[in-house]
Amino acid sequence: MKIKLEEKFAEQYRKNPDAVYFTPGRVNLIGEHIDYNGGLVMPCAITLGTWVAIAPNADSKFRFKSLNFEAQTEVESNRSHEKNGSLWANYPIGVINEFIKDGKQIPGLDFLYFGNIPIGSGLSSSASIEIATAYAINDYLNLGYDNLELVKIAKRVENEFIGLNSGIMDQFAVAFGEKDKAIVLDCESLKYKMVDVNLGNYVLAIINTKKPRELADSKYNERVEECQAALRLLNEEINLNNLCELTAEKFALHSHLIEDKTILDRATHVVKENDRVHLASKALNAGELQEFGRLMYASHQSLRELYEVSGKELDAVVDFCKDYDHVIGARMTGAGFGGCAIALLEKGFEEDFAKHLTDFYVGKIGYPAEIYVSEIGNGPVKL
Ligand code: GLA
């Protein structure tokens, strides 16, 4: 891909790029919708991702081109810029704005991007393009940020510039991923450990429902607000910084404070999902994959019934997996409302699974899902 991007760069900009970088996407194994509640999550980087080629220009411009989108953007380099509708270049522009706000001088630069993460699929194409940009500029211009600072910058872009009140998981996962390891990340303290993902006789399958994530951002922000409402109510009796400070037992003692059924359901998901991640982390360490798979199914059920972020497409995939003998666990991954599910699939059954799932899914939903076997890959790198 590096060579292809270099060639396209030369075609489009009539000069060679100085450097090419890669940043992955991510899947989350378990711990969904709890990063913004101070919970424990378990994502890993994947080998799909974003490539960016970069070179300086003498015109004091930032030029953003992509092999994925027709829209190209050119802005002056010596100041920050407003968000421009739903343009893809908002992500890199937002990142550069943050560098400028922080007092950095960024000279004119030309960029060419290519990504192979299906967009809107819940595999963090947006965190990938944010970190790709931040990592590339930081390295290329020697700005001196460490990876955690880049993660925080990218999260600010998502929250304040793009307007999605997301947690830190995606940016963290794509910046800190390591081959064949999951990151067990405490989203309150940002302490983390890398755990070996040894799936033995199983592989991690990713199933893209291809359901467009319509209105997903506004529904996402609504869930964040519902959790904040739950926290305010609980804090009438106790003193919590976030919902994930509660164990299920302690939550049961105070849950009477939440009268609204929807808010209660949301908080119940958060507290129990956090407990599940602790159990899942132990199960993975002990090689108890059946237990890990059981927790995946339980997570999905909770996201479906209590958190209401699944949908008929994701449910169809997980329902199929439950009835399919060679899968031991499956769940939606990421924000939900469409996007991808993941499944622990017995090795050797990849084709059989794809065939039967496709028949089932087309029968239920009307069009095919896409199925890949995923590899767990590394974080950002200069190629
Ligand atoms: C999106 C957000 C993350 C996280 C997940 C749900 O991917 O960007 O911060 O909240 O949804 O777990």
Image (spheres, grey):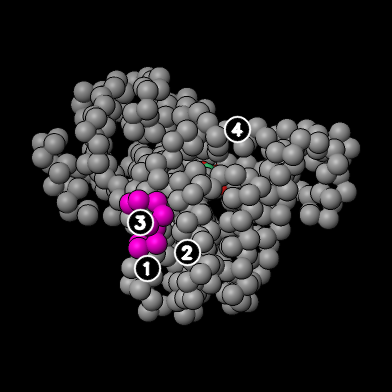
Residue type highlighted by circle 1: His
Q: Nearer the viewer, mark 4 or mark 3?
A: 3
Asked which quadrant contains residue 292, the reply is: bottom right
Left or right of residue 142: residue 242: right
Circle nearer the N terminus (3, 2) = 2
Circle nearer the N terminus (2, 4) = 4
Q: Residues within 10 Å of mark 1 (few under 14, many from 20)?
A: few
Question: Looking at the rendered structure, which numbered label has been put on residue 124?
Answer: none
Residue 116 seen: yes
Circle nearer the N terminus (1, 4) = 4
**Disc 2 + disc 1, Cβ < 8 Å:** yes
Residue type highlighted by circle 3: Val
Q: Which residues are magenta?
A: 358-367
Circle nearer the N terminus (4, 3) = 4
Q: Residues within 10 Å of mark 4 (few under 14, many from 20)?
A: few
359 within the magenta span: yes
Residue at the location (44% across, 67% down)? Answer: 204
**Disc 4 + disc 3, Cβ < 8 Å:** no
Residue 2, x across and y down, in percent: 22, 53
Residue at the location (35% across, 51% down)? Answer: 366
Residue type highlighted by circle 2: Phe
Alpha carbons under labels 2 and 1: distance apart: 9 Å
